[in-house]
Image: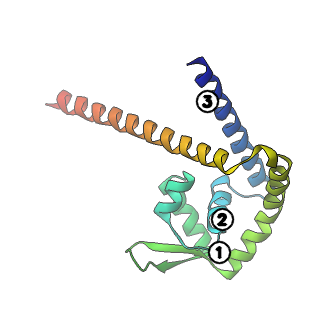
């Protein structure tokens, strides 16, 4: 168990350092961290729904909604009707693509240099394992949170009755 705890602690520290690095990067380009993350998510050339971005990138829905509205007002994104769902898809406009590239290019270059420096340590298995761990941890913590909320709701109902 101690070996697991040590490994998980190392992942947690690395994760916090990574978050801090991107927080600093956002400050350098004078942007809110979640806005930078939003542009990063959209800069893959595809359309995305707000639900998809919120879930994949862990941006709270209300925060994301505010960012989308700001980006629409600034001409960076547009909403388009989805072909398979009622939910609108978000797409960068031409201006948004240019802005995202200008803003993100330095970050992409820095990521690439860091990745190349550690390339011998990276493997598809490493990234797949980290992704699986994050998904499993998210499921564990989400189910525990739902259980706690259900208990609280039940206790409140019993207290009122």
| Label 3, residues with CA under 10 Å away: few <14, some 14-19, many ≥20 | few
**CB-based contact (under 8 Å), mark 2 and mark 1:** yes
Give me the C-alpha separation between circle 2 and circle 1.
9 Å
Mark 1 sits on what residue?
76
Circle 1: element type:
loop
Q: Residue at x 48, y 41 (%)?
A: 136
Kindly check if marks 1 and 3 are in contact, taking CB atoms under 8 A apart as contact. no
Camera-nearest residue between 142 and 80: 142
Q: CA distance from mark 1 to mark 3?
A: 39 Å
Give the residue at mark 2: 39
Q: Residue at x 54, y 45 (%)?
A: 132
Point out the tag, 1 or 3, that comes first from the N-terminus: 3
x then y, percent, for residue 134: 55, 42
As drawn, which residue projects farthest toward the left? 161
Q: In the image, residue 43 lies at what x, y percent?
A: 67, 69
Residue 41 image-quadrant placement: bottom right
Q: Is residue 84 left or right of residue 71?
A: left
Disc 2 or 3, which lies upstream in sequence?
Answer: 3
Crowd tier of the residue under label 1, counting other residues whose Cα lies within 10 Å: few below 14, some 14–19, many 20 or above: many
> What residue is rendered at 67% in x and 53% in y?
33
Image coordinates of residue 150 in percent, x first then y, are 29, 36
Q: Nearer the viewer, residue 102 or 111?
A: 111
Give the residue at mark 3.
Answer: 8
Q: Residues within 10 Å of mark 2 (few under 14, many from 20)?
A: many
Q: Nearer the viewer, residue 17 or 131?
A: 131
Say left or right for 137 vs 27.
Answer: left
Q: CA distance from mark 2 to mark 3?
A: 30 Å
Quadrant of the drawing holding the C terminus: top left
| Number of on-image labels | 3
Q: Which part of the image, by quadrant, shows the N terminus?
A: top right
């Amino acid at each position: 168990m101690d070996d697991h705890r040590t490994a998980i602690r190392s992942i947690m520290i690395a994760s916090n350092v990574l978050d801090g690095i991107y927080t600093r990067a956002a400050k350098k380009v004078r942007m809110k961290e979640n806005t930078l993350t939003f542009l990063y998510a959209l800069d893959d050339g595809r359309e995305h729904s707000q639900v998809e971005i919120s879930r994949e990138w862990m941006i709270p829905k209300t925060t994301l909604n505010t960012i989308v509205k700001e980006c629409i007002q600034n001409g960076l994104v547009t909403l388009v009707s989805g072909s398979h769902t009622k939910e609108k898809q978000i797409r960068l406009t031409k201006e948004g693509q240019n802005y995202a590239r200008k803003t993100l290019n330095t970050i992409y270059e820095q990521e690439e240099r860091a990745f190349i420096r550690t390339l011998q340590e990276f493997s598809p298995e490493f990234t797949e394992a980290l992704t699986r761990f994050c998904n499993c941890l998210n499921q564990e913590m989400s189910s525990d949170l739902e259980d706690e909320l259900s208990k609280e709701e039940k206790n409140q109902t019993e207290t009122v009755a």
